[in-house]
Amino acid sequence: MFENLSIEALQAYWWIIVSLLGSILVFLMFVQGGQSLLRTVAKTEDEKVLVLNTIGTKWEFTFTTLVTFGGAFFAAFPLFYSTSFGGAYWVWILLLFSFIVQAVSYEFRSKPGNFVGSSVYEWFLIANGVIAPLVVGAAVGTFFTGSQFSVNDMNLSRWMCAGHGLEALLNTTNVMLGATILLLSRQLGAMYLINSLDNEAIVYRAKRQIRYEAIPFLVLAVLFVLQIVISKGFSVDEHGVVSMVQFKYLTNLIQMPVVLILFLIGLVGIILGIFVSVFKNNPVAFWITGLSSISLAMSLFMLVGFNGTAYYPSTFNIQQSLTLQNSSSSHYTLTAMSYVSLFVPFVLAYIIYVWKEMNKKQLTTEMMKEEDHKY
Amino acid sequence: MEHIDVSLVDWSRAQFALTAIYHWFFVPLTLGLSFLIAIFETMYVRSGDEEWLKITKFWMRLFGVNFAIGVATGIILEFEFGTNWSNYSWLVGDIFGAPLAIEGILAFFLESTFIAVMFFGWNKVSKNFHLTSSWLVAIGSNLSALWILVANGWMQNPVGMHFNPDTARNEMLSFWAVLFNPMAVHKFLHTVTSSYVVASLFVIGVSAWYLLKKREISVAKKSILVAATFGLASALFTGLTGDSSAKTIAKSQPMKLAAIEGLYNGTHGAGLVVVGMVNPSKEIDNNENPYLFQIPIPNMLSIMAKGKPDAFVPGISDLIYGNNSEGIIGVESRIVNGKIAVSALRDYKTAKKENNPEKQQESLQLFNKYKSDLGYGFLENAKEAIPPIALVFYSFRVMVGLGFYFIALFALILYLLYKNKIENKKWLLHLMLWSIPLGYLSSQLGWLVAEVGRQPWTIQDVLTTNFSTSQISSGMVQTTFFMFFALFTLLLIAEIRILVKQIKKGPEGGSNV
């Protein structure tokens, strides 16, 4: 089946899978958003326990999606993996550190003998909650703005900026996307809390937070989109020559109707989701906003990968920019991995089933007291 | 070839070793305890005996603490291939990336989805669904071990691939060859069963402490019974897979085998050194005796490595300088061939760029002739191909010695349980308690033999460690090394303290009280 596809078709297929994983990651960062709100929405120990045990049953999905996103990128586009991770060292290390501390904090926070005290683990969770969406957003921003690296004839790469990735956090476009993703994750985190627990005080504060942050979030998102559509983009011709083209991403949107539809569904859906949350008080708001953010993130990934575009541009030497064609694995590996990808719907099916089983009841303090194992 | 920064290579190795060692403090317990918990819970569901439920929940609590830190230390390893070994990531990513991605898709999701049910589903799902979830967590964590060990097995014995001069990297030719690589199969079986031994020792040791304190007698004895049975079966299987690994290593990594044995001069009917001390002043080109003393079993090494008592087992000198009568080409000659391949590859790339088909064809032919030694072209000196002998030699002996000790310990425990005399044997209970760290020690030493023993290669005969690193400054890696060291040490201390508190508290009461 897959072996008969051309290498270009396989590259496109894998870009879609990587984009989907990246977009699901953006959605699942509602866990980080919830963590960043910990001290804002929960004031007492009981409230903190409720919040952490609500989002805490989902943290591993986000974590696993990040790891799988990295693994899929490695398997399908190894030149991106080697160039970006080996070059933008500091920014990736920063992200990884935030996830290392997240993984232990849920389990260790409330346990006696945890060595540094509960509040340190709470701050670890808050740090991860802020850093992860910010850094992931800024990193995706570099797909539009470029990075300073070189790739030699043997495809070995070197970072050409002393910041080793930290410079990405000084670029306003990148930071704008990072901040947008952070605010989105907080909107989603707050909506998830509203749906999943039965506690007036927390729900009240979560709703208040959605209202406070909705406008800044939407303004930032629109500003980022405006900046992208009017900016120059990294265009690749059929010979692999890269050039800067005005309105490249706008042109891509117009020339790829599917992407435009995903983009519009995403943007409108998020606005609708927030509206439903604020004015209609309906639990479906979380799912409208979440699925719309997947749609919007998908469109951004596809905008930089398809239609003759370099998805990881080098501003050091634009001819060394990475494209789906020059950075992918071999036809054989992409084919083998495509067969593995057939398992993804099965994985999604059991995740959805378990999610539904586990989220049947809203959590209350009384229920927490009966739990043998809790965070 | 670009200038190689030795200090960068050393710090990158140190960082990877540090993070892998820390990760391996937690993984064996996860791999084994997940199965033990599933067995405990099965006993509960089948018998309806509430005491099995208490046992299940107690070990699950300890499992949770250990699991979290295993996940925390694990994420860095996957990304470190990129951050610190970016040349490696490109040069073998076409093959190595696949098992990592599959690990995520097929194993991590299974683990992470059902672990939430295992911990938080007691009051939310049915008894059988919960039990299934516990088994799926065990299967998921062991599946993840399978895929990462397939990746590691491929590094030790690179099969199913070729070097593509156009992309200047190694590319996969057969997924099945990579998956069913004999090295990977042995490595997986050896690693998971030895991890079951570590977990069994942990359960036995903690239970022994209860017996010493004369509390939780019934819980402790039941736990010991299951763990000692599981441990004995696993330890025996570990021994068998260790033996079969020897033949694979003899074939694909003869230098590692020579280092394990401290064997400098190859011989027919080679003996296996059971106990010995290597001579620190022995070098390949002096005439010192390789051992200060040794007690060998005659012909045993030949039997283990090649299946015949009089088979030839090459020593370090044979492998470095070659041995015509045994048909061994030495590293010295392979370096010469490798340098020709490296320069032919460079010429090929230049000719391609300059659009010179004649020169391109000529250099490609030359490259193809010598490409099997391409990796050796990145060595400067044949002696670089010798791994650190003493470290590998001693680590191996301590690991194997402990393996035999564990078998004896499990058997003795089961015998005394059968005779119902275990609580009275205080010396044995102390031994059981103090055997917990020995399990971890032997497991870590196994990795030391596997990883240090294959130096100077990241991919055996294909890619050197020196050429695998990212092109960053050694200062950056030094900084992150100490950051990891500090953070992981802090987390390890916290983990041990939490575990000790939970154990002292015992099976009664919740985890947070």
Image: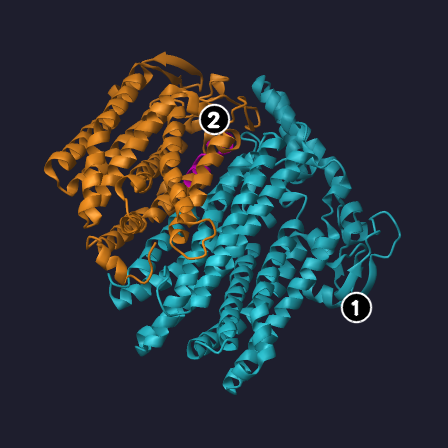
**Looking at the magenta stretch, what is its main secondary structure?**
helix
Specify whether residue A71 is in view.
yes
Chain that bears disc 2: A
Question: At numbered mark 1, what does the secondary structure look like: helix, strand or loop?
Answer: strand
- Looking at the rendered structure, the kind of residue marked 2 is Leu
Q: Residue furthest top?
A: A246
Q: Position of residue B402 (x, y in %)?
A: 64, 67
Q: Quadrant of the N terminus of chain A?
A: top left
Numbered mark located on residue B25 in the image: none
Res B295 label: 1
Q: Is residue B31 visible?
A: no
Which residue ends up furthest to the left in the rendered image? Answer: A280
> In what quadrant of the picture does the C terminus of chain A appear?
bottom left
Residue B49 location (% of width, % of height) = 32, 78
Colour of chain A in the image: orange
| Disc 1 packing (10 Å; few <14; some 14–19; many ≥20) | few
Q: Give above or below for B486 relative to B496.
A: above
**Along the line of sight, the residue nearer the viewer: A175 or B513:** B513
Q: Is residue A8 magenta?
A: no
Magenta stretch bounds: A72-83
Residue at 60 percent of width and 46 percent of height = B17
Say which residue label 2 marks.
Answer: A166
**Color of chain B here?**
cyan
Taking the image as shown, residue B277 lies to the left or right of residue B61, namely right
At mark 2, the secondary structure is: helix
